[in-house]
Image: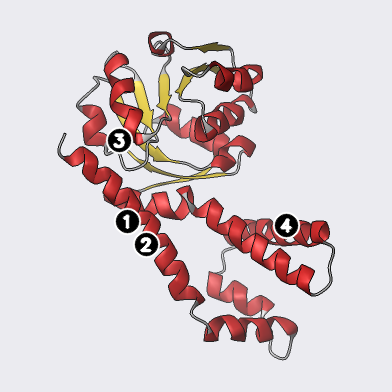
Amino acid sequence: MTDVSVIGCGHMGSALVKGLARTDTHRVTACDLDTSALEAVEPYCAQTTTDVAEAATAEVVFVAVKPRAIEAVLTGLDLPADATLVTIAAGVPRSFVQSHTDATVIRVMPNLAAETGNMAAAVAWDDPDETVAALLDDLGEWVEIDEEHMDVATALNGSGPAFVYYLIQSMAKAAVAEGMNADAAETLAAQTFKGAAETALRSEESLEALIDAVATEGGTTIEGMEVLWDSDVESVIDETLGAAAERSRELAGGFDDE
């Protein structure tokens, strides 16, 4: 049983709390100044508190607050050297966090699918941490990256769910325009993304090969793919990820001068 604290119970923090609660192998303390946020996650916690000092007693402490609040939280968070602090604040470099704590600092960019155990996360650390790795395993899939690529990860898997929701919505709308019931269209579109993603993760085939397997010559898929290949959708997606990554870099710049 691992003692874990989650400081900040907004969308991402509450997703972490609920995701960790699914396994029954963690004792989770939720901490937030907003008592309504604590009430929302109370069924999934061993305890809730508004006191950062009380949350600091855990073996692993997640800090899931907005970048603008990170310094205030760190100032009040007195962690011992044998503790582990996992920061998920977008654009906040580990060097800034390390300057405010004696604990081991790990930076993670997760996403909201942590709540259902389907998270995609990027991790930057000095050395692998078995306890944190086990926690992340319980929340979904994760990869280790160099911290210099964390802004890209913030765009790809951190912001990415919103981009995927948009694509699901667009496909569902197109089906409705062809006469399909809206609820049925959304279910089929969402499940199609889910199944395709699972196949991409588990298959040994390349993405190009998977496309070819569906887009057989003379079939229906190839007609749709021709439209995509002839469009500028790839450049639009590139611009979309680039804009989100650039915003992460801008946020990081605010901490370089600290």
C-alpha gap between disc 2 and disc 3? 29 Å
Q: Residue at x 78, y 68 (%)?
A: 176
Above-or-below relation of 28 to 228: above
Q: Residue at x 68, y 76 (%)?
A: 214
Q: Which mark is residue 246?
A: 1
Q: Residues within 10 Å of mark 2 (few under 14, many from 20)?
A: some
Q: Residues within 10 Å of mark 1 (few under 14, many from 20)?
A: some
Amino acid type, callout 4: Gln
In screen coordinates, is 247 left or right of 50?
Answer: left
- Quadrant housing the N terminus: top right
Q: Which mark is residue 242?
A: 2
C-alpha gap between disc 4 and disc 1? 31 Å
Amino acid type, callout 1: Glu
Depth check, mark 1 against mark 3: the one in front is: 1
Q: Residue at x 43, y 10 (%)?
A: 51
Circle 2: element type: helix
Q: Which mark is residue 127?
A: 3
C-alpha gap between disc 4 and disc 3? 37 Å
Amino acid type, callout 2: Gly
**Residue for badge 4:** 191
- Is residue 1 among the parts visible in the rendering? no
Depth check, mark 4 against mark 3: the one in front is: 4
* Mark 4 or mark 1: whose residue is earlier in sequence: 4
Residue nearest the viewer, comparing 136 with 183: 183
C-alpha gap between disc 2 and disc 1? 6 Å
* Mark 4 or mark 3: whose residue is earlier in sequence: 3
